[in-house]
Image (cartoon, grey):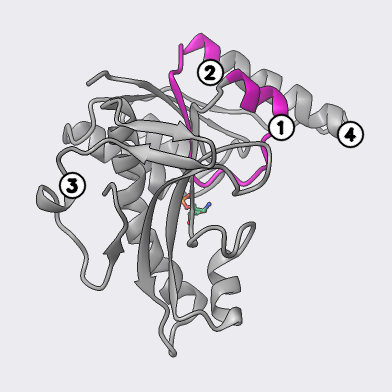
Amino acid sequence: MSSLRLGILASGRGSNLQALLDASAKRWISSRVAVVVSDVPEAKALDRARAVKVPAEGIAPSAAVRGPERRRLHERQMLKVLHHFEIDLVVLAGYMRILGPDLIRAYPQRIVNVHPALLPSFPGLNAQRQALEWGARVAGATTHFVDEQVDHGPVILQGAVPARRDDTEDSLSARILEVEHQLLPRTVNLIEEGRVRVEGRRVHIDPGPSWKTRLPVLPDVLYGDGY
Ligand code: GRF
């Protein structure tokens, strides 16, 4: 088991970041959040980090530069911070921008994302609303490695929840979010334990102790293999 230095990218509320901070404080994971970077300088995620004395930096894309150069410049600034803090694993925890090749190539198979749907269904924005509008009966959350397409890289963990007839976007999002808060720390845990291997599109998880037997499980959630 190794303790990884986590670099978190977050754009908003930061509840997934909080799940990682809590898991680290409770020693459910041995990795530590070493820095939080947000493209939104006033994001609540940054306050959550500062509240527990974790370095937090707001780096907004420059308003003076346009087009693809803007993202390149922005990512260069973020990379500088990630390198400075000697980050081993980058975690996208509600990071609402598409990553460009510079950042992705700097951390090959070392960037994970959490998405509020059962990928490959409903990639992109408003996944929970997409699921409801489609009439899906089952929804869920996915963690995956990040590649150069949106919400596309190899799946690590999934958890499924019912999508109910009377669900609103908010009620379904809340049900999914609880699962996100479990899957994301567990994903870090599996990676720090060296149990995750990527084989093409597929992720192989070496057998070992399950979190289902150690930590509370939620009713009506189907935890996919690896949890
Ligand atoms: C989560 O649902 C995440 O999957 C999605 O955006 C939301 C972020 O929530 N990408 P939070 O900022 O972690 O609370």
Q: What residue type is labelled 4?
A: Arg
Q: Is residue 42 above or below residue 131?
A: above
Q: What residue type is labelled 2?
A: Leu
Marks 4, 1: nearer the viewer: 1
Tag of residue 211: 3
Q: Name the residue under label 2.
A: 82
Q: Mark 4 points at which residue?
A: 66
Q: What residue type is labelled 1?
A: Gly
Q: Distance from label 1 to label 3 (Cα)?
A: 33 Å
> In the image as oriented, which residue stretches furthest toward the left?
214
Q: Name the residue under label 1.
A: 100
* Label 2 SS: helix
Q: Is residue 6 above or below residue 163?
A: above
| Ligand 1 within 8 Å of the CB at mark 2 | no
Q: How many residues crowd around disc 1 within 10 Å: few (fewer than 14), some, or many (20 or more)? A: some
| Near-viewer residue (31 or 19) | 31
Q: Distance from label 4 to label 2 (Cα)?
A: 24 Å
User: Percent position (x, y) of residue 116?
Assistant: 48, 59
State the residue at coordinates (28%, 34%).
189
* Label 4 SS: loop
* Label 3 SS: helix
Q: What stretch is highlighted in magenta?
A: 83-106
Taking the image as shown, residue 84 lies to the left or right of residue 97, namely: left
- Whether residues under marks 4 and 2 lie with C-beta atoms below 8 angstroms apart, the answer is no
| Near-viewer residue (76 or 201) | 201
State the residue at coordinates (40%, 31%).
197
